[in-house]
Image: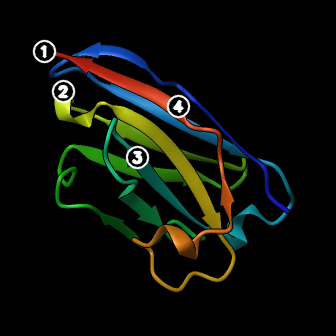
Amino acid sequence: QVQLVESGGGLVQAGGSLRLSCAASGRTFSSYAMGWFRRAPGKEREFVAYTSGSGGYKYYADSVKGRFAISRDNAKNTVYLQMNSLKPEDTAVYYCAASSSLVRATTPASYGYWGQGAQVTVSS
């Protein structure tokens, strides 16, 4: 079992930056692939970023590539999402997710554990 708790959301002006954190419980954090997803009002949940258990492989949605960066610190059982050059269309609730047996990084169904979400609001 893994419990995930996000933090770091908030209100920021367009062009600004935020860093989300996701703290995980458990002793085997490095065995979990981690992903970030988001859900904007009236829209489906969408993939944002992914990192492998070691952090050596990362993958991003085209909409955030070059602006967002996912990283993890396995010693601290934490995964991060650094968000730069934020746009109003980045406004959403952001969720971190963990998978012990990843099939497809971009598919929510591949992840068995989810955090409660963190609101990110970008004003224009």
Classify mark 1: helix, strand or loop: loop
First in sequence, mark 1 or 3: give its number: 3
Residue topped by disc 4 = 118
Name the quarter where the C terminus is drawn: top left
Q: Is residue 22 left or right of residue 63?
A: right
Occupied quadrant, residue 32: bottom right
Judged left or right of residue 45, residue 33 is right
Q: Secondary structure at mark 4?
A: strand
Q: Earlier in the sequence, mark 1 or mark 4?
A: 4
CA–CA distance in space, label 4 to label 3: 9 Å
Taking depth in this image into account, of 29 and 64 the one nearest to the observer is: 64
CA separation, marks 4 and 2? 16 Å
Question: Are the two marked residues, 4 and 2, in contact with CB atoms closer than 8 angstroms?
Answer: no
Amino acid type at mark 4:
Ala
Q: Amino acid at mark 3?
A: Arg
Dot 2 amino acid type? Pro
Q: Residue at x 72, y 50 (%)?
A: 77
| Figure check: 42 above or below 91 | below
The residue that label 1 is drawn on is 124
Q: Determine whether label 1 and label 2 are within 8 Å by CB.
A: yes
Label 1 amino acid? Ser
Choose the circle earlier in sequence order: 4 or 3. 3
The residue where tag 2 is placed is 88
Seen as rendered, the residue at the extreme front is 42
Q: Is residue 30 visible?
A: yes
* Numbered label attached to residue 45: none
Q: Are marks 1 and 4 in contact (CB under 8 Å)?
A: no
